[in-house]
Image (cartoon, rainbow, N blue to C red):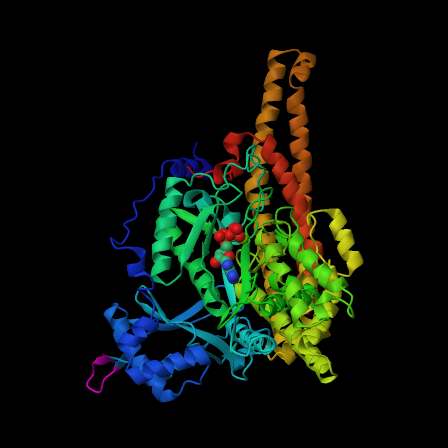
């Protein structure tokens, strides 16, 4: 047993859980220990500076240089006490993940020594030479300048010896090159639009916040097994591998007992996460073997996005200490569930939650209905865009795979809420109870509380489901930056609310009372967005056909779906809401297509190498052994008898020969398809070529390899099999 696979299997089997030393104190005492949060600000900043900072954070007041200098000084003192020597502007470039460039605090003094220096200037702005980050052509390499600028609404934190400063990343000419800048703009847009609509109901509402509570799914794989799989190492997923006889059929992993090694990892991870202010709340096994989930308590969307990015990198680091690798790829293993990142989204005001029923007054209940309906309207009008916002080469492997939502965006409301909307819609405008004024409104609207109290029905197949006090956007990929989905969603809802407000104002101007005007506009929107409401099973072919009839976006090809960002509807929406310009959108799409191509290109190369260097030689080796056996049999038995006894051998020899030759031919075609695609100039067309001509070849090759895995002698198969990868002891 000399092959790498068996050594890895053996090593994995003998690993024991690492003892995690938890800080002796309770979580509440080390929570956010590594974050320069309000509490630390109060301690390390002069009183008037602290107050100014709070104004900057809470009320969006502009930060001036003097304040920045004073804040930097306080931060430095705190950081040096933490043993920090470096600082970095931490940002979220378009190639997913996060980026950082570390600089030491030291500056030369005038006597040949150094002093620890950190000024407001360094805190507020940096100019990383970031020419190698994707910019979709906005920043030519000769104009490599990109600026990172501090986002004071997200607190600074410490990782090891480095002070990390959350920043936005923009080009010399002001276009955003990251996720954070447009996210902040979309949060501003929804704040403005939603606050104005809230004012119809309650003039004490001054601010509306978008909240996000993500649920992060992931797989763990033993690190020795991981290294024995070049495909996992280089692409994040297995490009081949036959189903394990047992995988998730028994549903015995979900909420099952967590293996000791994994428990130790989770504990370690949560301690680190809590220190960074991430409120890890639940963890459990997921449906697939080796699949787990972690969810924090929801918070303001900007912070939640940062925390998710931070958690993903933290996971990778902590996993290494436990002999694991984290797989964040949306579909690491065929035939079992992939990983998503449910984005639980809601809105709240300075006075309370907006998507929560029952409210205390009839007006609050009507407001609830308005926000539900306008959310649906935004989701309906931009359903293609929302799909584009969650799609990637990797998430495309998962969506529509009979385990995750289909690649069609619809919304599940649950029977009670759905019935309520139907009732409001069909109520006779003139005579209905609803429009006869507040007194009778009181009779009708308070039905909502009872209707919603036991709204516990769930629909796991819906990509955008209402779950009582929030919408759960389930189509987001496990590897993605949540910001992408949140930018699209918040902007779409902001636009719907802004339009709603204009119409209600007009109805009021034309003589309607406020409640009647609101009801009229809400009814129009209930009618308008009806096609996006779907309560049935989203996994079926019937739904696909029905969705087409309804005019929902049913496109399945990832590079085509990206085009939704550039439709007139999308560009107008983003520009009008002040979130992104046409130029930014075009540049981002270039990056999306280029990234798509690169990921498939890498996969195709790895597939080719593994086929020719790992699989075919082993299949040949086994085939030779079979041939030898046939010969040997003929030396012992008469030929007829030998051939009869060796019938299975003949079949296998033939099957191996046929499958191997298909693989060889397909690899040649795969290489040829890549060559043709690589010559295409347009990033869009290149991505389409990769999707249409390269991906199908890879699938065809995989099919042959997976069959070979079943017939070739297990003792010479080179790659750890699913049954070995998927069950941590
Ligand atoms: P489930 O698996 O049933 O969806 P979880 O407990 O795993 O539930 O995750 C629920 C997620 O929803 C958590 O991240 C939680 O913080 C979040 N959440 C709960 N209420 C809200 C809300 N009002 N707005 C946004 N997110 C919320
Ligand atoms: Mg959930």
Do we see residue 567 in this rendering? no
| Prevalent SS, magenta region | loop
Q: Position of residue 496 (x, y in %)?
A: 66, 72
Does 718 appear above or below 25?
above
Q: Is residue 81 left or right of residue 719?
A: left
Q: Position of residue 688 (x, y in %)?
A: 70, 61
Do we see residue 588 in this rendering? yes
Q: Position of residue 79 (x, y in %)?
A: 28, 72
Residue 114 counted in the magenta span = yes
Does 497 appear above or below 401?
below
Quadrant in the rendering for residue 694? bottom right
Q: Is residue 3 left or right of residue 272?
A: right
Q: Quadrant of the N terminus?
A: top left
| Extreme residue toward the front, this view | 439
The residues colored magenta run 108-115
Question: What residue is shown at x 37% (from left), y 42% (from top)?
Answer: 261
The residue closer to the viewer here, 271 or 132, is 271
Does 318 appear above or below 384?
above
The residue closer to the viewer here, 387 or 466, is 466
Q: Position of residue 387 (x, y in %)?
A: 65, 61
Residue 10 counted in the magenta span = no
| Extreme residue toward the left, this view | 111
Question: What residue is shown at x 53% (from left), y 38% (from top)?
Answer: 722
Does 320 appear above or below 648?
below
The residue closer to the viewer here, 4 or 170, is 170
């Amino acid at each position: 047993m000399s092959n790498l696979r068996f050594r890895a299997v053996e090593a994995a089997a003998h690993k024991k859980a690492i003892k995690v030393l938890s800080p002796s104190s309770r979580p509440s005492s080390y929570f956010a220990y590594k974050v320069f949060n309000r509490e630390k600000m109060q301690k390390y900043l002069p009183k008037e500076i602290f107050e100014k900072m709070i104004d900057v954070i809470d009320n969006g007041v502009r930060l001036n240089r003097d304040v920045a200098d004073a804040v930097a000084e306080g931060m430095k003192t705190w950081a040096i006490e933490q043993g920090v020597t470096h600082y970095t502007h931490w940002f979220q470039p378009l190639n997913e993940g996060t980026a950082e460039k570390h600089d030491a605090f030291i500056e030369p003094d005038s006597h040949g020594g150094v002093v620890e220096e950190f000024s407001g200037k360094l805190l507020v702005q940096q100019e990383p030479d970031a020419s190698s980050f994707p910019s979709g052509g906005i920043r030519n390499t000769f104009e490599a300048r990109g600026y990172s600028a501090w986002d004071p609404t997200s607190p600074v934190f410490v990782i090891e010896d480095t002070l990390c400063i959350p920043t936005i990343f923009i080009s010399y000419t002001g276009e955003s090159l990251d996720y954070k800048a447009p996210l902040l703009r979309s949060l501003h847009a929804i704040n403005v639009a939603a606050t104005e609509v809230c004012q119809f109901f309650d003039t004490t509402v001054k601010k509306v916040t978008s909240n996000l509570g993500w649920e992060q799914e992931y797989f763990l794989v033993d690190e020795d097994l991981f290294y024995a799989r070049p495909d996992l190492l280089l692409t994040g997923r297995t490009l081949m591998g036959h189903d394990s006889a047992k995988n998730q059929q028994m549903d015995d992993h979900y909420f099952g007992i967590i293996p000791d090694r994994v428990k130790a990892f989770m504990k370690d991870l949560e301690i680190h996460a809590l220190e960074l202010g991430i409120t890890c709340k639940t963890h459990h096994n997921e449906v697939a073997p080796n699949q787990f989930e972690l969810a924090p308590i929801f918070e303001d969307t900007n912070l939640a996005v940062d925390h998710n990015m931070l958690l993903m990198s933290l996971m990778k680091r902590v996993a290494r200490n436990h002999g694991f690798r984290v797989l964040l790829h949306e579909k690491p293993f065929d035939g079992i569930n992939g990983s998503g990142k449910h984005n639980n989204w809601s809105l709240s005001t300075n006075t309370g939650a907006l998507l929560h029923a029952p409210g205390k007054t009839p007006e609050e209940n009507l407001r609830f209905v308005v926000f539900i309906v306008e959310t649906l309207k935004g989701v309906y009008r931009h359903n293609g865009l929302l799909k584009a916002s969650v799609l990637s080469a990797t998430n495309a492997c998962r969506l529509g795979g009979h385990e995750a939502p289909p690649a069609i965006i619809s919304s599940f409301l649950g029977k009670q809420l759905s019935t309520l909307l139907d009732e409001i819609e069909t109520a006779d405008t003139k005579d209905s109870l609803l429009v006869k004024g507040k007194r009778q409104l009181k009779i009708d609207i308070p039905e909502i509380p009872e209707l919603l109290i036991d709204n516990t029905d769930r629909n796991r197949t819906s990509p955008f489901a209402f779950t009582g006090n929030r919408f759960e956007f389930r189509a987001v990929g496990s590897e993605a930056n949540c910001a992408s989905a949140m930018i699209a969603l918040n902007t779409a809802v902001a636009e719907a609310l802004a339009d709603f407000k204009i119409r209600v104002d007009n109805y009021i101007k034309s003589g309607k009372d406020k409640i009647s005007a609101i009801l009229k506009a809400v009814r129009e929107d209930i009618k308008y967005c009806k096609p996006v409401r779907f309560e049935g099973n989203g996994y079926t072919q019937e739904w696909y056909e029905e969705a087409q009839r309804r005019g929902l976006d049913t496109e399945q090809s990832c590079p085509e779906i990206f085009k939704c960002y550039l439709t007139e509807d999308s560009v107008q929406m983003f520009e009008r809401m002040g979130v992104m310009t046409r130029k930014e959108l075009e540049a981002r799409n270039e990056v999306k297509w280029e990234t798509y191509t690169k990921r498939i290109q890498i996969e195709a190369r790895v597939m080719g190498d593994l086929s020719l260097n790992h699989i075919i030689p082993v299949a040949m080796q086994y085939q030779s052994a079979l041939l030898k056996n046939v010969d040997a049999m003929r030396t012992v038995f008469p030929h007829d008898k030998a051939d009869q006894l060796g019938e299975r051998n003949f079949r296998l020899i033939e099957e191996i020969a046929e499958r191997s030759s298909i693989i060889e031919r397909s690899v040649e075609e795969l290489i040829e398809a890549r060559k043709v695609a690589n010559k295409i100039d347009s990033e869009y067309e290149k991505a389409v070529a990769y999707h249409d001509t390269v991906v199908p070849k890879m699938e065809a090759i995989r099919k042959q390899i997976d069959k070979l895995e079943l017939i070739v002698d297990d003792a010479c198969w080179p790659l750890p099999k699913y049954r070995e990868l998927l069950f941590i002891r």
